[in-house]
Each structure stands twice: as structure tokens, then as C-alpha cells.
Amino acid sequence: MMTERLPEHVDVAIVGGGPVGALLALRLADAGIDALAIEARVTTPADPRALALSHASTEALARVGLWHDELGATAITRVHVSQAGTLGRTELSAAEIGLPALGHVVPYSRLAALALERLKAGPVLKRPKADHATVALGTTVTGVDRLARYARLSLATPQGIHRLTAGLVVLAEGGQLLAALDDVEQSVKPYDQHAILATITPAEPHRGVAFERFADDGPMALLPNGDDYTLVWTQTPEGAEARLALSDAEFVAEVSQRFAGRIAGFVKVGPRASWPLALKTLDSVVGRRVVMIGNAAQTLHPVAGQGLNLGLRDAATLAELLAVTPPAQLGDAATLARYAALRRKDAGRVTRFTDGLIGWFESPNPLLKHVRSAGLLALDQIGPLRRGFARKMVYGAR
Ligand SMILES: Cc1cc2nc3c(=O)[nH]c(=O)nc-3n(C[C@H](O)[C@H](O)[C@H](O)COP(=O)(O)OP(=O)(O)OC[C@H]3O[C@@H](n4cnc5c(N)ncnc54)[C@H](O)[C@@H]3O)c2cc1C
């Protein structure tokens, strides 16, 4: 619920109203927790990302009104995985596990716009107890100062500087404010890779089939998005630069050639963008009076499409924990240690899996190439293994 007056103190301040921060804010409002969501944007800028979300993620979003038909999400009915230059391939299908879809693809900009809309409109189930604003849009947090019993935030609002205190600060802002924390260390592992993103139109309807292709010069994913595909093509920085400079016809020809035999070519490509890739992790997702969730806690390579899926699970777990914690203890070290313990296994496993996939498929070693091929063939032949993989896609890689 948006009102004029910003509070002087809240129990929980959530910095960032992207999909992860919005999910948490709406869940805390439902639980009657005194929280303020602070988001720098008032509108969402164009963003070329398309996000593949698991069934569990869409259910978590739907619970707080962040998922509905007007989002225009595209169902993934099958995922085709293959490695160039070998016989290794497999296909995961929703029908095989008795479901209509393995997951859905949604444009990031639409989901982010819905997050802003929902924050403005207020919580779904109950009104928050607070008699002050529960969301501050167009407001950037410029400083975080933490003391033993509370934290102090500096906000740049449209009306000027505002200062408030909070029992707990949740950083869901992608990680820009981490440098201000003296008790949390971020590690950055650059991949020396860029992701090229483009909307590309197939010559024939995609019928909900997604592709993951491990080409010799970098993994490529095609996500069905409306009538088109969103292409995510991982390249060296030089390779990305060269491909961004190609004419549309040359670019379409290159992509068509890499999917020859699998897709009947492409007819046109939209504007292309490229994104530098790095793995960013923290030595601890909690610090004094602060907890990091979503991309602020971990930023992953997009190859496995797990970043937001994981971030939504961070937000849901934190919401569940805070809902059963007395207000005076929300930011206590014991509460935060409990949250960190609850998320350690899932976050660690998904981070290692995604990072391992890059190393595994990146190696030019011909022996490894055959091992990878054999792995994909085995997955294809062993029904229970394949169905287990498909279920992980649907319900999340827990
Ligand atoms: C190319 C690419 C493809 C991807 N594909 C997938 C996929 O298929 N599936 C998947 O699950 N994930 C995918 N991801 C990852 C996914 O995009 C992120 O994990 C997700 O967007 C993180 O959400 P978030 O809410 O944590 O952060 P963000 O979406 O970055 O939102 C952060 C918000 O905080 C606000 N903010 C920032 N600083 C401040 C401040 N100081 N004060 C106030 N507000 C602030 C910003 O305006 C923004 O609204 C992909 C990523 C990339 C790069």
C-alpha cells in the first residue's frame, strides 16, 4: 500500500523491489510484519532477458499475485539437450512425467513491471499493520550503517534525503550495496564469457520446445517466448563482439547452422545485446542486522536458468522464517544464522551445479567430449534418470 509518509523505523527494510524483493515484501505484508520495500525504479526499463521458471517458482509467484495469464508466459513442453559434433543428445518431456509443462518462460521486463504494480497495489491477503508507507518507489538506498540493535539507512527519495532505522535490512538489490558491509566478503569469478541475447523467429512454430546446445565455441539456449525464441549464446568477449557486429542475415545464418537438423532455420532476428558473465558468491549470506537474497546473495551463469528460481526460494524461506519470529528478534544473529543454515544446501548445490556445467562443457579435451556425449546418451536411454531430471526442472533443483 503506497501512502505519502515514510516511516522513521520499520522492523524490516527490503532494499530492491525486483521479483525477489517484491515476493518477500508481499509475503511479509501477508504475515502482518512491519516492513518497507524500497525500490529505485518507478517504471521498468526494456530488458532483453527471458527467464525460464520452474513450476515451483510460478506457484510461489502466483501465491502473492505475481503470476497471471496477462504476463504472457510461454509453456515449455520439451527440452532438447545436445552436444555439437557427437551423438550425445537427450530430450526431457512434460508428457513423460504426466504434466502439461516443464516450466514457463517470461520476459524479465514484464515480471519486473508486475512486481512494481503489485507493490503499489498492496498485499493480496491482509492489510499490513503499518500506518505508514509500505513501499517507497523512485527511492534509492545510498547508505547502510549497522549498529548492534538496529541498522540505519539513507534514502534518496523524490522529496529529498530520508533516514530510517530498521531491525533487519534485506538486500534484494542485486548486490550493489555489498561494498558498504564490513562483515561480508564477496568473491567474483569472472568467466571471461559474454551472453549474447536476441529474439529470433523460427521458420516453423516452436511448439514449446526449448533447446540447450553445447556448441564447440560455447553453450547456446533457445527459450520459446511468445511466437519467437529468446537466444542466449555464450561466447568469449571477442566472439560476442564479432557476432554483435554481424548483419542480421549473417547472424541468422550462423545460428541456423548451429541448430541444423534440429530446427528448420530462422527467419529474422531482433536487436542483439551482450552481457558479461561472472559467478558472484558471498562468504556468508548474513551479516550484522543484514541478510542478502536473490542476486545479492549469488549471481550465477545463466546457462542453467537457475538464478531467479534460486532467488525466489531465498525469499520464500526468509518469509516463512520471519513470519514465526517475534518482531524484536527479526534481525538477531540467531534468526539470521537459522536463515543461513536453511539456505546453505540448496544454494550451494545449485551454484556448484551451474558452475560445474560451464567447466564440464567448456573443456576442449576430446576424451571429455566423448564422456559428455556418453552421459547424454545414457540419460536418453535410462528412463527413470531422465524423468528424475525432468522432475527437478519442474519442482526446482532442491
Ligand atoms: C542473460 C541472463 C539470462 C537469465 N536467465 C534466467 C533464467 O532463465 N532463469 C532464471 O531463474 N534466472 C535467469 N537469470 C537470472 C535472473 O535474471 C536473476 O537471478 C534475477 O533477475 C534476480 O532477481 P533479483 O530480484 O534478485 O534482482 P534484480 O532483478 O536485479 O532486481 C533488483 C532490484 O533492486 C533495485 N535496486 C538496485 N539497487 C537499489 C538501491 N540502492 N536502492 C533501491 N533499489 C535498488 C533495482 O532497480 C531492481 O529493481 C538470467 C540472467 C541473465 C543475465
Image (tube, rainbow, N blue to C red):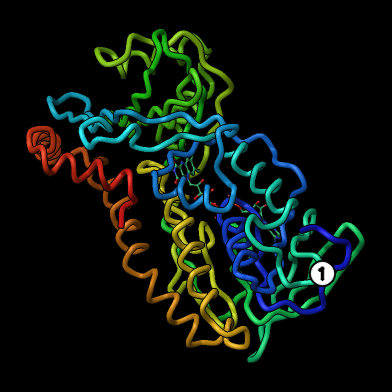
* Residue 155: percent from left, percent from top: 79, 67
* Residue 237: percent from left, percent from top: 46, 37
**Residue 266 in view of the camera:** yes
Q: Farthest residue toward the right?
A: 159
When the figure is inspected, residue 273 is found, relative to residue 25, above or below; the finding is above
* Residue 224: percent from left, percent from top: 43, 25
**Residue 145 in view of the camera:** no
User: Badge 1 local density, few (<14 within 10 Å), some, or many (20+)?
Assistant: some
Front one among 285 and 250:
285
Q: Which residue is mark 1?
A: 132
Q: Is residue 156 left or right of residue 311?
A: right
Look at the numbered disc 1 and give the secondary structure of its residue: loop
* Residue 356: percent from left, percent from top: 27, 52
When the figure is inspected, residue 6 is found, relative to residue 210, above or below; the finding is below
Q: How many marks?
A: 1
Q: Is residue 212 left or right of residue 186?
A: left
